[in-house]
Amino acid sequence: MLLAVDIGNTNITLGIFDGDSLVQSWRLASEKNKTEDEYGIILNKLLSFHGFEKIKSAVIAGVVFPLTDIFKKAVEKYIGIPSLLIKADMNLGLKLDVNNPSEVGADRIANAAAVSKLCKLPAVVIDFGTATTFDIVDKNGNFAGGIIAPGIKISAEALNMFTSLLPKIKIECSKSAIGKNTVESILSGIIRGHAAMIEGLISQIEAELGASVTTIATGGYSELISKYLKKPFDSINPDLTLFGLKILFDLNKAA
């Protein structure tokens, strides 16, 4: 069994693989102030409660560097298994065709690795996290580059934080493009505006690649945003990053 860990700015996503099958997943809050002992105890309780004592290895992708190191130590100390930390200079099974490969986040590398093996190419992964990211994989299965935009939640929080009159809102469906009150107006701008941004950027990506793309969405707002697209996502896979980590682990486990 393999423990896959995706450490993001908001959540830590954990997955257990038995062979090629994802048999269990959890989400924890990303808390930089927690120690390796605290995370180790939480992790140990989770695995013991669900009967996953036969884990042999772990693979970790992290974009929060202090927390990534803390979690890696927790895994090795409390679970007693080796862990592989995803980096741009290891065997990825694909080329990072960008100016500075070391700048590409480990989660985005995992997304690219997943779609290069599992999807019709070229393809674009739209990942709804703290930021909304686009990971473009070309027809040869290589990472061609990406796009980073403010995420839905932080966009809503910014409106509340940097204005005097706009309230903090709950992210939910937008009833109409034309809002009849402040909340409806904000929801239209954020939800429908995000969908319009995605459609526009996909169109530009296809123009630059000279080909239609497969669109794969992952992250918490995938289903919500898909409702407002003229052409819905080709697929929605909330566990895409975990599958990418499994692929990367298999490529590098011998090392």
Image: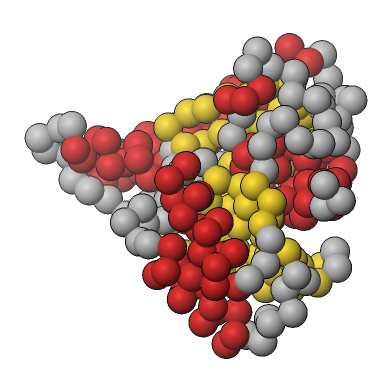
Q: Quadrant of residue 206?
A: top right
Residue drawn at point x = 10 percent, y = 35 percent: 164
74 relative to 153 in the view: left or right: right
Compared to residue 100, the image places residue 252 above or below, namely below
Q: Quadrant of residue 112?
A: top right
Q: Quadrant of residue 31?
A: bottom left
Residue 226, visible in the rendered structure: no
From the top left corner, tell me how far across and down residue 13 is, in percent: 56, 59
Compared to residue 5, the image places residue 91 above or below, namely above
Residue drawn at point x = 51 percent, y = 64 percent: 74
Comparing 137 with 97, the one in front is 97
Compared to residue 58, the image places residue 56 above or below, namely below
Comparing 25 with 203, the one in front is 25
Comparing 88 with 121, the one in front is 88
158 relative to 141 in the view: left or right: left
Residue drawn at point x = 61 percent, y = 57 percent: 5
Numbered disc total: 0
238 relative to 165 in the view: left or right: right
